[in-house]
Image: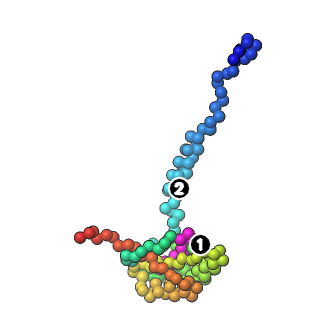
Amino acid sequence: MYYSKYTRKRSSRRAISEMNVVPYIDVMLVLLVIFMIATPLLTPGVKVQLPQAEAQSLEDHSNKPLIISVDEQGRYYLNANVNPEQALNAHDLVVKVAARLQIEKSQGQKSVVMVKGDTHASYGQVVGAMVLLQRAGVAQVGLITQNPPDQGAA
């Protein structure tokens, strides 16, 4: 290329057109820490001591199952309730479960209903919950148990 004294030489310094992603990485790490701390606090539920039994796990369903918990005193709790830690009477349980079933049916989803009974709850209290579910229109009910700890191989 021929350069005369009247033509300018091209500058060797070019503008940097790359984006600086370091601030975005910092923000993502902060969000990750916040979500890691907050996630265990978001899982509501009633503390019940599950009976231990060896059973096969059910296949994974896309929608969240409806879980009715029966505590030691025979009180009923519903995980889909506005306040899952608030005990429900029998009538409210039937109404809320029936409403949830209607909503899922209208959306074309299959309802999965589980009963989680405390080890110290009487058999009659757990069966009572299952009768209430039958009144609400539930066709199939599963029972939630906890796998027993391994006793060690002999």
| Lateral position of residue 10 relative to residue 111, left or right | right
**Which numbered marker is on residue 82?**
1
- Which residue shows up at 37% across the image and 76% down it? 54
Mark 1 neighbour density, 10 Å: few (under 14) some (14–19) many (20 or more): few
In the rendered image, residue 132, in percent from the top left (x then y), is placed at: 54, 86
Check disc 1 and give the amino acid type. Answer: Val
Q: Quadrant of residue 83?
A: bottom right
Q: Is residue 112 magenta?
A: no
Residue at the farthest front position = 1
| Lateral position of residue 152 relative to residue 87, left or right | left
Q: Secondary structure at mark 1?
A: loop
In the rendered image, residue 34, in percent from the top left (x then y), is placed at: 53, 53
Q: Is residue 68 magenta?
A: yes
- Which residue shows up at 62% across the image and 38% down it? 19
* Residue behind mark 2: 35
Q: Earlier in the sequence, mark 2 or mark 1?
A: 2
The magenta-colored residue range is 61-70
**Does 126 sit above or below residue 34?**
below
| Lateral position of residue 4 relative to residue 79, left or right | right
Residue at the farthest left position = 154
In which quadrant is the N terminus drawn? top right
In which quadrant is the C terminus drawn? bottom left
